[in-house]
Image (tube, rainbow, N blue to C red):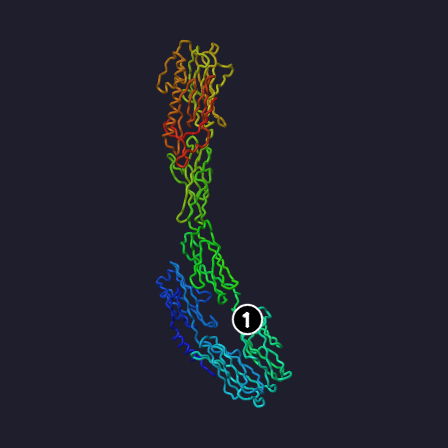
Amino acid sequence: MLFSWGSILGAQQLLLLFLLHTSWEVGSGQVLYSVPEEAKHGTFVGRIAQDLGLEVGELVSRLFRVVSKGRRDYLEVNVQNGILFVNSRIDREELCVRSPVCSIQLEVIVEKPLQVFHVEVDIKDINDNPPLFPVKEQKLFISESRLPDSRFPVEGASDPDIGSNALLTYRLSTNHYFILEVKSKNDQNKLVELVLKKPLDREEVAEHHLILTATDGGKPELTGTVQLLITVLDVNDNAPTFERSEYEVKILENAAHGTLVIRLNASDADEGTNREILYFFNSLTPPVIKDKFHINPDTGEILIQGHLDFEDVNSYEIRIDATDKGNPPMIGHCMVLVEVLDDNDNIPDVAVTSLSLPVREDAPSGTVIALISVSDRDSGVNGQVSCSLSPPGPFTLVSTFRNYYSLVLEGSVDRERVPAYELVVTARDGGKPALWATASVSVVIGDVNDNAPTFEQPVYTVFVKENNPPGSHIFTVSASDPDAQENALVSYSLVERRVGERPLSSYVSVHSESGKVYALQPLDHEELELLQFQVSARDAGFPPLGSNVSLQVFVLDENDNSPVVLPPHSGSGAGGVPVTELVSQSVTAGHVVAKIRAVDADSGYNAWLSYELQPESGVGRGPFRVGLYTGEISLTRALEESDGPRQTLLVLVKDHGEPALSTTATVCVSMVENGQPAKTFSGASRISAKSGVGKDTALVDVNVYLIIAICSVSSLLVLSLLLYVALRCSAPPQASHGPGKPTLVCSSEMGSWSYSQQRRQVCSGEGAAKTDLMAFSPNLPPCPVSGERGQKQEAVLDSSGKVGHHGLYTFIFV
């Protein structure tokens, strides 16, 4: 039969126009469309944006996109008008083979906020495939002895279309010997047989050439043909026959090699060798059947020799020929239908599509991180899959549609605590025993600048010797930031303030990257004992975060100041004019002739002064001595004529530093006759002159002045203690201090008090009934006192009335 492809194509175009009407429905979160196969590029499918309730103008800004699982991009969406259209050729037979239902599953994703829609496009079949026979020519061998109504099966045609498009009808070309009979087992399987109408005569016609035509039920109809070559055989007039023309067998997939499928038994009415039967696969049996099955030619047993897989082929039609050993041999035929039963032999398949990685620390709960789809090639309960997530954490799986899940953030995450999560999605089917598959999802947490730089401690104490070189490195601050990248990049800077009249930046600087602190100029302990300031550490995040640390820099004293003699003996050394002291010849041993007063701008041992009387060359032991720590020049015995009327004394004043520094003072002592007024330099007279209590008068009675001196010193001591207690209770702590000034408090035969530049005190006396008291301040940091972060020091008034720090004093009684 001849047919025109042009007419078929014209009919197809009409059919396309007829089927172009698409249907859609929204239910349970799914939109359904339909489109015929082989539709041209650009064919309208549906207004997907309108059907999903989305605004067309927001498709681009909301990042509208379509995801098709495991398929090519058959369909596409025009984001300008929201229309779903055909993007590439769709062949239903290629896409779904012979499945009665064929559809394309689409995932539509929009953001701001994130929404996921499920769209199903049903692919409608059109009659685009003609019936096709397995071979172009089928050969049949029929004995002339076959009786009328004998039946001879021929291989039918197949049509990859479905429905009425695959419903085949057959017709046989006109002849005098055969008619065509078709038995329908179902809509798809038909048994096509040639029925002999009258006996064959080989001598009349040795071969018959017939044409078998198959026509499908599509509109327009398509046809296929095959040539039938029938050879008429002579003699053997009885063919083997089976009990049934068709056998049905069910067998489980994955059956072992050598498993028996069926044992066939055919019989032959002939006798002798003509009734001996051999079993073979039909000559038209496809190779795939021969690969899967084996037939024993002698016993008729069909055995499994290949792997049966329900998911590949779920049924086999095996044509068996039973051939006798006659000459010519006679053949009987039967059909064995093998149905393969499903076994749970396929693990589920898990596919993960990442959407929002990495996940920021501040991501809100409900953020969709990934889409997960699962499938199982098995059928029934063996193909039903459920999903679970492990390990427990701030994530969960939410079922969005059949076999589709969303990985959703349901709690808070902290990158500094857990920088990444290794999640395992487990898909488990419903078979027994159940099979499962896993997929790993690595969720990296993106950093947010939520941590400020921190120091190991809030306050650092640094000790620096004075007279340091300019630009010397005195300390290094270091802050850590648990954030990442630029959020953890720390820079350092000074918290600027004024130190006295000068800015802090004139004293110190800090390197912005390393945190090294440098002294920009030599520090002077006598000018600045303690330098307090703050260093700021700030990261490079947005917005930047920072914190401060306090530094206490104690300037340690060096012995860089020589003692200085105070007036009236300040000009008596180094070539100056010595001071002359008058002494009566009647004074006794222990009488104080003069007192040398000196101060040292250093502190501690560097300011602890001692006095030594330098002996004159060529002169024996003189009648004078000097107090080691008081500086009082007194008589060791009564004066004699041999001592001479005038003596010059050289007093060496030195500190206890390393190396020690010293100075000298020269005192001239002149003796006067008894009864002449003698000038005394006792501590009581000096204090009286300083305080204005009395003026220098002639000594009437030395004992009276000694008593007055003792009472004065005692009173001043009590007043000093009361003043100190009052200042401790009322004066506020100070952040910084400046240098003090030397102040003389008192001096007497019992002892004396003196202040150095740093307000350190020395008290001493001589004689058996006297007690020497020495007070000095070591180079130690002040003891912390509560208030203002525990870093402020005690404050006392110095001689100038200013508030300064009160150092730690050590008193030694000798």
- Which residue occupies 47% across, 65% down? 70
Amino acid at circle 1:
Ile
Query: Is 787 placed above or below 410 here?
Result: above
Q: For residue 258, what is the image quadrant? A: bottom right
Query: Is 252 placed above or below 671 here?
Result: below
Query: Is 723 placed above or below 7 here?
Result: above
Q: Nearer the viewer, residue 360 or 422?
A: 422
Instruction: Give the residue at the far right of this rendering.
Output: 272
Q: Give residue 347's position: percent from left, percent from top.
A: 51, 63
Q: Give residue 792's position: percent from left, percent from top.
A: 40, 34
**Could you tell me which secondary element the residue under label 1 belongs to?**
strand
Lateral position of residue 283 relative to residue 582, left or right: right
Q: Nearer the viewer, residue 814 or 803?
A: 814
Residue 703 visible, this orientation: yes
Instruction: Give the residue at the far bottom of this rendering.
Output: 204
Q: Give residue 185's position: percent from left, percent from top.
A: 49, 78
Give the total of numbered labels: 1
- Which residue occupies 45% across, 50% down? 415
Which residue corresponds to mark 1? 251
Q: Give residue 506's position: percent from left, percent from top.
A: 41, 37
Q: For residue 111, what is the image quadrant? A: bottom left
Instruction: Give the residue at the far front of this rendering.
Output: 243
Q: Nearer the viewer, residue 757 or 660?
A: 757
Q: Nearer the viewer, residue 326 or 727?
A: 326
Query: Is 559 placed above or below 59 here?
Result: above
Residue 38 visible, this orientation: no
**Dot 1 surroundings within 10 Å: few (below 14), some, or many (20 or more)?**
some
